[in-house]
Image: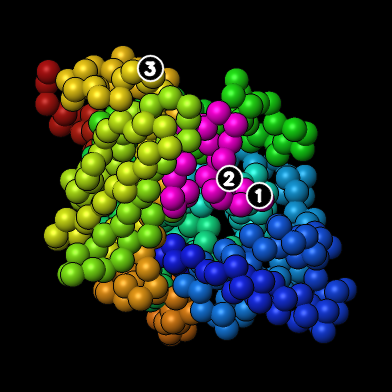
Amino acid sequence: MVVITSVEPTEEQVKLLHSKVAQEVSAIGEENFLKSDLTRLKNETRGGNWMRRFLLHQDSEMDAAFKMAMDALKVRFEYKIDDLNPDMFGEKFLSVGGFFQRGCDKDGCRIFVIKPKTRTDEKTDELKKLLLYWFDRLERESEEKITVFVELTGCGIRDMDMDFTRFLVSCLQEYYPYFLNYLIMFEMPWILNAAWKVIKSWLPPKSQAVVKFLDPKSLPEYIAPDQALVEWGGNDAYTYRFIPEKTQIEATSANGLSALEEMRRKVHFADGETGSMDTEISDASGPGRISEGQLVKLKPSDEILFHREDNETIGTIVLTNIATKPITYKIKITSPDKYSVRPSTGVLSTDANVTVAITVKAGYHTSSIVRDKFLVMAFELDANAANLSSAVLTDLWKSRSDTAQQFRLRCSVAAGDASDQGFITSASSASKPSDDVLKKLNDIANGQKRLESKLSYQKYFLILQFFLVLSLIIFTFKGQLIRQITDGTCPAP
């Protein structure tokens, strides 16, 4: 399972892993790898970003990241991922809506929906290829994380293909680095508890924190109603249809972003406001660049690093006014009950800076920090507005918040403080399930199918038996009536 820690590897670690993988590929022979992967590796920026994700996934453990990278390259070549396309699956696979992407969760991560109930007679190998097609397509569109949403409404054991489920977990755990935000199991019936126990054995104990069992009441904690389908209790009246992957440049919104990027950059904060990023968090040019017209410089520019100090978990942001006029700033959080932010709002004159201290309140585990986002907002004030009262500042924010520049920051935990029980460790420690357990579960599923078949036959047999008995009764009564009439013993009306 994907590691949810955001301990950032150093530039030297990324370069070292990139070099080691390139050397190993050369030693094995480039003919044993996909051309697209070779091109990606040879590109310093794209290859470096890819290697960084392997390190993030493995908590910056070099050997584990190297092994994962090589395994991923080999599996991609084995399945010839470059050749996977919708045409090879046919209309039957694509029309039922068993796999599709729709909406984003509250962290701005795309939602990839899997509906086991829609399966017909597809073979497991074909389903695996279709899953790889979708994962690769989503990764081509954006390397940001996804949330996998498994809709289990009305499912029984016969709907659970354990071989496919194991492959799904392997993809997220071993082949697609740092790609999973949450694995949501929606409305899982109690009858699938045995299946979950087997799936649970495939995950590192601490990685189970990314698996969420939700129903319509608890879903809004992770997916806003406007992003949830009506059938989940949300407001999105979406009707499935397969949409081919765009090969041309995507249509852009008014601010120059694609529709996908526009959706991804929205963050739902505690007061219901949706913050939209006007500045890039990070891209090929690296985080921390200053955009033209930017009002405030943030340090760190994209990720707040929390660490332990005097039995407290704290992080800091330094805000510097780089505009020609005074500015006002405001900081919002996705989980305000979890943090103390001092100061959370204020005014900065030109070239002035302020250090914002963020303290995690008692009772919250380290693992929950990496889920949260901070939104820094700022807009310019008049040149003589450096000493505004709190009341005036509050009124200004009410009237001008929609014009403020916005900067979203992720959260991470220092490597030395990421060892408590709430923090996710490397997926390489995952325990493997017993083949006997898996065999027994499959036997249970097959046994249920045979039992359902027998019950169906018995139902038809009982119906036939009922009509035969009914016919016999009618025939016997009719015979007795005829004899009574013939003998003259039939009672008078």
Neighbours of disc 1 within 10 Å: few (<14), some (14-19), many (20+): few
Which sits in the foreground, 387 or 262?
387
Is disc 3 placed on a helix, strand or loop?
Answer: loop
- Magenta residues, dominant SS class: loop
Left or right of 483 in this view: 54 = right
Which sits in the foreground, 132 or 351?
351
Q: Is residue 320 above or below residue 212?
A: above
**Residue 292 highlighted magenta (yes or no):** yes
Residue sitting farthest toward the top: 399
Q: Which mark sits nearer the N-terminus, 2 or 3?
A: 2
Which sits in the foreground, 99 or 336?
336
Q: Which mark sits nearer the N-terminus, 1 or 3?
A: 1
Q: Is residue 453 above or below residue 309?
A: above
* Relative image position of residue 12 (x, y in whole percent): 61, 73
Distance in Å between CA atoms under marks 2 and 1: 8 Å
Q: Which residue is mark 3?
A: 382
| Tag of residue 289 | 2
Q: Which residues are magenta?
A: 276-302
**Residue 463 highlighted magenta (yes or no):** no
Disc 3 residue type (three-letter) = Asp
Neighbours of disc 3 within 10 Å: few (<14), some (14-19), many (20+): few
